[in-house]
């Protein structure tokens, strides 16, 4: 996958996460989205995440929210356990002890939690 295509995918992913965060924030009437925490896998640089975040919240009700980045170990999928996902340094499934398959690079971050107020 080219760098350009990868970047587009990450932008789409970030926009989807912001939409999800706004959806969660809308469950709390009268409050607005203050912060979005992402869990980040692999080696995506912070600067790129802040950049994607700023672009994704422009012209949305999320404008002004802050980004919090939480680093995780590599993420794996265990097919032995019906596709269960887990984070690990070694890649060993916590359920069955089999070696999991590392999640592809393009799935590098996900929504962890939001803060409203
Ligand atoms: Zn397993």
Image (tube, helix red, strand yellow):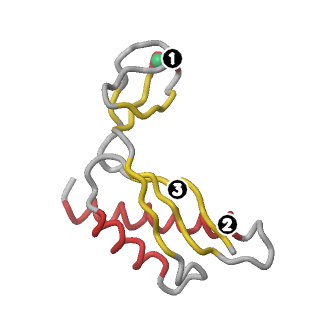
The residue mark sitting in front, 3 or 2, is 3
State the separation of the CA atoms marked 3 and 1.
24 Å
Q: Residues within 10 Å of mark 1 (few under 14, many from 20)?
A: few
Q: Is residue 17 above or below residue 56?
A: above
Q: Which residue is mark 3?
A: 111
Mark 1: which secondary structure?
loop
Distance between mark 3 and mark 2 Cα atoms: 12 Å
Residue at the bottom extreme, as displayed: 59
Q: Is residue 108 above or below residue 89?
A: below
| Marks 1 and 2 close (CB-CB < 8 Å) | no
Q: Residue at image x 35%, y 66%? A: 49
Disc 1 or disc 2, which is closer to the eye? 1
Q: Position of residue 62 (x, y in %)?
A: 57, 78
Q: Position of residue 115 (x, y in %)?
A: 62, 66
Whether residue 113 sits left or right of residue 74 in the image: it is: right
Rendering coords of residue 110 (x, y %): 47, 53
Q: Is mark 1 within 8 Å of ligand 1?
A: yes
Query: Is the C-beta separation of discs 3 and 2 under 8 Å?
Result: no
Secondary structure beneath disc 3?
strand
Q: Which residue is mark 1?
A: 95
Q: Residue at x 35, y 47 (%)?
A: 41
Cβ of disc 2 within 8 Å of ligand 1?
Answer: no
Say above or below: 79 vs 96.
below
Residue 23's disc number: 2
């Amino acid at each position: 996958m080219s760098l350009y295509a990868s970047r587009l995918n990450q932008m789409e992913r970030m926009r989807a996460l912001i939409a999800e965060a706004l959806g969660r924030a809308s469950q709390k009437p009268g409050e607005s989205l203050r912060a979005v925490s992402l869990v980040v896998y692999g080696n995506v640089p912070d600067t790129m995440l802040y950049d994607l975040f700023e672009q994704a919240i422009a012209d949305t009700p999320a404008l002004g929210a802050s980004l919090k980045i939480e680093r995780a170990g590599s993420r794996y999928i265990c097919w032995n356990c019906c596709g269960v996902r887990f984070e690990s340094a070694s890649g060993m499934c916590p359920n069955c002890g089999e070696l999991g398959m590392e999640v592809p690079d393009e799935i590098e971050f996900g929504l962890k939690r939001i803060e409203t107020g």
